[in-house]
Image (tube, rainbow, N blue to C red):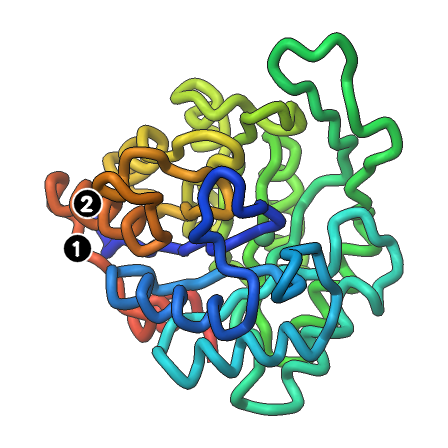
Amino acid sequence: MEKLIIDARLNEYTMRDPNPNVPYSPAEIGADAAACREAGASIVHYHARDPESGAASNDTELYKAAAREIRSRCDAIIMPTLGASTVVELDDRIGHIEAMAEDDATRADLVPLDLASISLPIWPEGADHVLGDDLVYYNSVGTLKALAARADAVGAKPMTAIWNIASLRLLEAFCKTGVLPNTVFAELFTTEGGLIAGHPGTPRGLQALIDFVPASVDCVWAAACFGANALPLAEMAIEQGGHVAIGLGDFGYPGLGHGEPATNADVIREVVAMASRHGREIATPDEVRERLGLC
Ligand code: ZN
């Protein structure tokens, strides 16, 4: 099997309760990324956050500063997020990626394209009503085509985020019609922790996605789970030739930190140990660049 690609999902919009090791500031993101690279991650994914409060931020300067901090410390492939999930304006979605590309020290290598427009219902365990009345993740076909073209124009390759089987059908259609390259990195997302928009983060929930990864394109897929322990799904991916996207952005991983709150690097080391037990070697960033055709 090919070498394992590990994407460290550093922070998302997850707060430091319960795990205080979620990085917020550019310097924290840079140091955390370097520790994850050292542990075996080849890709690092981050969201800009207010350095003090951790609030979600669309500040281009924070995105740039974090990329600069990462690139000055290590050779990891850099994948910032696009603009906040429920923003519709294209400039607000990808303007920071274009600004980052003006300087080699801050440019993004990969950007996530979520191949679905979906409601984002949140139903915390035991809650007597469903939250998220007005939350819609807007990714029309036209929006996705435009985002893919604008990312490509500044040398950033797409990572496709897969929410359901229909996302995989769209992935195939986009690859076959030139919207996306024929070799494409895809993260198969499952969702737990009250977010019920995706497949369950269970072996059956993930397997349903794996079963529909299109055979007609060169799809390099990784397993991910927002809101629960993704390690069982990581093991499935390792066994089936897939890859792994995991980190404190998705889940706090109590118990992995040897008595202390776990760090992102602790989580990556756990994946590397698991890969070793299954005989999978770990891909370096340069090997992933080659595999995914990144510049
Ligand atoms: Zn993200």
Residue 33 percent across, percent down from the top left: 40, 66
Tag shown at residue 240 = none
Residue 198 percent across, percent down from the top left: 61, 28
Residue 201 percent across, percent down from the top left: 47, 25
Residue 285 sits above or below residue 61 on the image: above
Q: Is residue 43 left or right of residue 4?
A: right
Residue 101 sits above or below residue 130 on the image: below
Q: Is residue 136 left or right of residue 110?
A: right
Asked whether the viewer can see residue 178, the reply is: no
Asked whether the viewer can see residue 149, the reply is: yes
Tag shown at residue 275 = 2
Q: Nearer the viewer, residue 42 or 72?
A: 72
What residue is rendered at 54% in x and 90% in y?
A: 104
Q: Quadrant of residue 137?
A: top right
What residue is rendered at 72% in x and 69% in y?
A: 149
Check disc 2 and give the amino acid type. Ala
What residue is rendered at 82% in x and 36% in y?
A: 135
Q: Mark 2, residues whose alpha carbon is within 10 Å: few (<14), some, or many (≥20)?
A: many
**What's the CA distance linking mark 1 and mark 2?**
7 Å
Tag shown at residue 281 = 1
Q: Secondary structure at mark 2?
A: helix
Residue 155 sits above or below residue 271 on the image: below
- Specify which label sits upstream in the sequence, 1 or 2: 2
Check disc 1 and give the amino acid type. Glu
